[in-house]
Amino acid sequence: MKIGKMNHIRVAHASDLHGNILPLKNVDVTKIDAWILSGDFFPNITRGNIQTEINYQSDWFCNERDTIFKALGDKPVINVDGNHDFVSLGALLNEYAYAGQVLQIAENKLVEFNGLKFAGHGYIPWINGEWRGELRIPEMTNIVDQVWDNGFADVLVTHVPPAGILAGPWGCSVLANSMTYKDHTFTHHFFGHIHHHKPMEHSQNGTRFYNSATGCQIVEMY
């Protein structure tokens, strides 16, 4: 594994809020440089009825927009969407003219902030076909390969954790294998999805891992 050079930034990492804005409101935004939001930002009203969820989540965001914007405090938002997000947080922030920078990560592109490169994706291993972004192993392998093919980055942001790291018996085995056996320069990996490990961190093989499911962690990145 190759380890990259890390600039110093202070981020607030939140995940799996499912419509609970309170963890955002509790952060003193004057003391952070950016937000990392790693998915499942929105509440749900069904178990995967796509059009109903799109309408409901869009309306919810519109109703809560001012509260969300105030909580985020015009700070840059680095985002991936989760399996419960049937609309894109990044797209809605841009649509409603959020004053801060919006950096939406995707498997086929890197984003940069403060000299750091961020990579990642918002997909999860297959559960039962109800949720957005569920992939079987061959599809997930293709997505993770695309992330690695983008080139070396400093920070990885995914919705799902790698199997075996702050994930209990769950997580993504494809991601875990790539983290273990492929060269990379990720000094930090942010995720959520598995609520049993709410906000926690772990260090392994030169990478620091953060699961902030259902809450928020302040992370000093060096």
Image: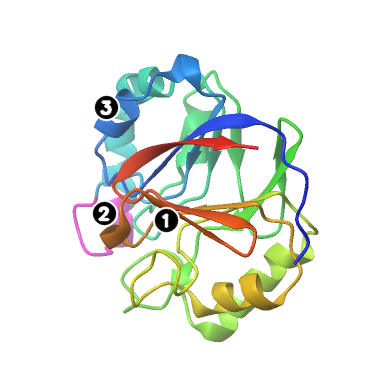
Judged left or right of residue 27, residue 38 is right
Question: Callout 2: few (<14), some (14-19), or many (20+) C-alpha neighbours within 10 Å?
Answer: some
- Element under disc 1: loop
* Lower position in the chain sequence, tag 3 or tag 2: 2
Q: Which residues are magenta?
A: 44-53
**Residue 28, image x, y percentages:** 39, 19
* Lower position in the chain sequence, tag 2 or tag 1: 2
Q: Relative to 60, say whether 163 is above or below.
A: below
Work out which quarter of the rendered image holds the N terminus and state it.
Answer: bottom right
Q: Which residue is mark 3?
A: 63
**Residue 199, image x, y percentages:** 34, 48
Q: Residue at x 62, y 30 (%)?
A: 9
Q: Which residue is mark 1?
A: 82
Question: Callout 1: few (<14), some (14-19), or many (20+) C-alpha neighbours within 10 Å?
Answer: many
Please identify, in this view, whether the residue under mark 3 or under mark 2 is nearer the observer.
Answer: 3
- Element under disc 2: helix
**Which mark is on residue 52?**
2
Residue type pointed to by label 3: Asn
Judged left or right of residue 201, residue 128 is left
Q: Residue at x 39, y 60 (%)?
A: 83
**Which mark is on residue 145?**
none
Residue type pointed to by label 1: Gly
For the residues labelled 1 and 3, the Cα–Cα distance comes to 21 Å
For the residues labelled 2 and 1, the Cα–Cα distance comes to 17 Å
**Residue 22, image x, y percentages:** 25, 30
Residue type pointed to by label 2: Thr
In this rendering, the count of numbered labels is 3
Work out which quarter of the rendered image holds the C terminus and state it.
Answer: top right
Q: Residue at x 34, y 78 (%)?
A: 169
